[in-house]
Image (cartoon, grey):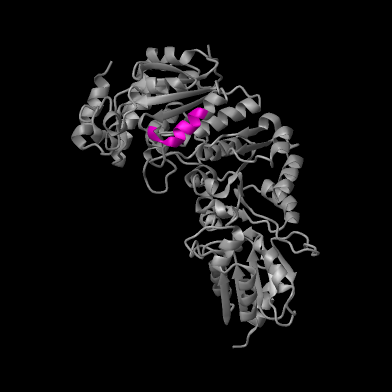
Amino acid sequence: MWASTDPFSVMSLSKTALKQARQRLVGMHYRARAGHLGGNLSCIDAMMLVHHEFMGADDRFILSKGHSAGALYVTLWSLGRLRDSDLDRFHQDDTLLAGHPPAKGIPDIHFATGSLGHGLSLAAGVALAAKLQNVRRRVFCLTSDGEWQEGSTLEALIFVTHHALNNLTILVDHNGLQGFGSTDAVASMDPLHERLAGFAVEIRVCDGHDLDSMRAALATESNRTVMVVLNTVKGRGVPDVAGRIESHYLPLSAEQYARAIAEIEATP
Amino acid sequence: MRDELCRQLVTRSSSERMIFLAGDVGFMALEPLRAAMGPRFINCGVAEQNMITVAAALSHEGMESWTYTIAPFCYARAFEQIRNDICIQGLPVKLLANGGGYGYGVMGPTHHALEDYGILLTLPNMTVFVPAFREDIGQTVCRAGDLASPAYVRLGHCEKPAGEIVPSYAPWRRLLDGAAGVMIVVGPLAGSSWSVLRELDAVIRPALWVVTELPIGCNQPPPILIEALKRTRRLAVVEEHVAQASVGQEICRWLIKAGIGIDRFCHLYALGYPSGTHGSQAFLRQCSGLDPVSIGKAAMLLANET
């Protein structure tokens, strides 16, 4: 069993905290008139769980799918690492909370990401450094599923498996939708977990919206890099956009926002 | 220069902080470094984008990261990785790039680096080193290694003329005095230019200067060079790089900002492949007018009154 250190993992993630985070995420995007909500909603459950239950202060989280920055900001807010007033500045002029994670200014965010295909190499370097420096550090890297079409991501996967970076956990937000179509229709790698099984990674597949399913996938160590494929729904919890390509880009209307908040509230 | 580079890196590698990433090149050159560094020497394979980003992350974690590959596989193949993961992050990764300019000769255009420092100097806080002589390598490794910001080192061949002694390292060095203007040469071509200009009388030749650190804005020409420009109002710039974003262009901008007028200006630069054929570095330089005869003509052009 992985042991993590404080201060992040002092308590288990409650469904109430998760509900609050989802509402804050939707509200933040609505007020900012920001898109990319769908990919944020598909991964916020995993991001919250990893940060609240699996990460210690010395661990690192790298958001390779940088367009889900909002979910990361909300997660850090839920941990008290960002203030409410910080989130209010999301997508505004003179903000640190850009549409993709910034390089500097937020201590828990280590790298500017947003161009897909960089995060896994960054995570590989951080994980390798920990090994070389004899530091016990677990590194988490969240990728999208479409991102596996980037050649550099496969370069990185070859590297992490060759160097047996078992302090690295790769999370794949497998929501099945990308910018202009479904991953299956655009450049299919389905089933992704089978395509990547030829690499020396330990692949675990789970429900990316079920906390216990994810806990089971994340809990145990391996002598290999662990890859957790999170089966998710893009735009989950927002009835008007869930599972639809529109959720990749379009901001919510007032009516859609009201329905979204009600839906999240009604979800057990 | 590669043997000297390896020797200097071996010396530096006594620091446990140093890590060296190679892009599957270095055969018959870097074996001593690999032996000295053990697990801190990593051949990343044929995957330059990953290599550059891994180097950035290692640097972020406190290690002194060096990468090594053929020049275009660094700056061209992995440009976005250099931009996003090194420069936007402000990380002091050291990028060693072998084969500056036409260095890989008849290997062909895919292996040439004619636009490297121009492209890279568009990025924030990037310093480019273009060591001209074997004697420069020690200082280049130290200065790039100690830099707290990104560095790109364009490596070529030493072209120092026989019998000459290279002045102590400085970003700007005068190799020859001369009364007929100023010739500024970037990197190793200074050696070949030295061979040409030393045969001319000092009265009719330009003073020969070599510049080995860029950008000009961070390494302003020294006062005696500026004084010579003001006095003679004649300037030639020679570089194995395309004209766009070149040192020649940057010097013109600097001259205008400094209010220094030039009556006679000559810029020798890489033209690409005007012959449509391939050949050695010497052949390709000749096609671009970067060969010794062309450099001599440029010197005479500065000297001539009409």
Q: Is residue B119 left or right of residue A147?
A: right
Q: Which residue is painted at 57% across and 75% down in the image?
A: B266
Give the residues drawn in magenta, as a range. Answer: A149-158
Please say whether residue A239 is one of the residues in the magenta stretch.
no
Whole-percent x and y of residue A193?
38, 20
Whole-percent x and y of residue B274?
48, 65
A224 or B293, nearer to the observer: B293
Name the image quarter holding residue A164: top right
Name the image quarter holding residue B246: bottom right
Q: Which residue is painted at 63% across and 36% down in the image?
A: B62
Does the magenta stretch mainly form a helix, a strand or a loop? helix
Q: Is residue B33 left or right of residue A260?
A: right
Question: Given the current orientation, which residue lies at the most extreme left position?
Answer: A255
B282 or B215, nearer to the observer: B282
Whole-percent x and y of residue A51?
46, 23
Q: Is residue B306 left or right of residue A89?
A: right
B7 or B80, nearer to the observer: B7
Asked if one can make out residue B72 in the rendered structure from this viewpoint, the answer is yes
Please say whether residue A154 is one of the residues in the magenta stretch.
yes
Would you place residue B229 above or below residue B193 in this image?
below
Whole-percent x and y of residue B156?
65, 54
Q: Which residue is painted at 38% across and 20% down in the image?
A: A194
Name the image quarter holding residue A215: top left
